[in-house]
Amino acid sequence: MAQAKRADQSADTAPEQPRTRREPVDKFRDGPVQVSIFQNPSSKGDFRTATLEVSYKDKDGEFQTSHSYTASVLRHMASASISAAEKISKWEEENKSKTQAQGR
């Protein structure tokens, strides 16, 4: 079965556009968890997303990203997720209020 193309995908013949690295609009830590919040544009208006990352140094001293977590780290991730959701929700409410005040 053929999959439908997403609306934001470019045609196969379009030249590849270089991706620019976007900086987060907010960053914070909860224990070992680094949270970054990004603002993303869309045709329906901007929206925000969060990334959570746990890094560690390997035996060679190089930083690596973990994909397996202890109970303690999971508690920090839960707390960080709640904080990120609150920050994003606050921004959404403020943004909604500004949009309504401008008569949009």
Image (tube, rainbow, N blue to C red):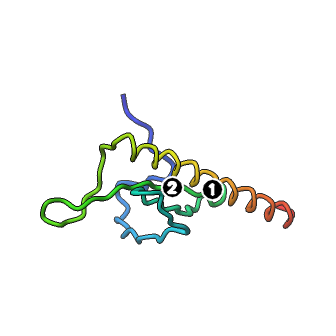
Query: Which quarter of the figure has residue 33?
Result: bottom left
Q: Position of residue 6 (x, y in %)?
A: 47, 46
- Mark positioned earlier in the residue sequence (1 or 2): 2
The three-letter amino acid code for the residue at tag 1 is: Ile
Q: Most extreme residue toward the front, as rendered?
A: 72
> Which residue does the numbered mark 2 point to in the structure image?
50
What secondary structure is found at the residue carrying circle 1?
Answer: helix
Image quarter in which the C terminus is found:
bottom right
The three-letter amino acid code for the residue at tag 2 is: Ala
Q: Position of residue 20 (x, y in %)?
A: 41, 71
Q: Position of residue 88 (x, y in %)?
A: 63, 56
Does the residue at mark 1 contact the one at mark 2 (Cβ under 8 Å)? yes
Query: Which quarter of the figure has residue 48?
Result: bottom right
> Which residue does the numbered mark 1 point to in the structure image?
88
Task: Give the residue displayed 25% in from the left and 59% down from the top.
Answer: 64
Q: Most extreme residue toward the left, as rendered?
A: 60
What secondary structure is found at the residue carrying circle 2?
Answer: strand
Q: Most extreme residue toward the top, as rendered?
A: 1
Distance between mark 1 and mark 2 Cα atoms:
8 Å
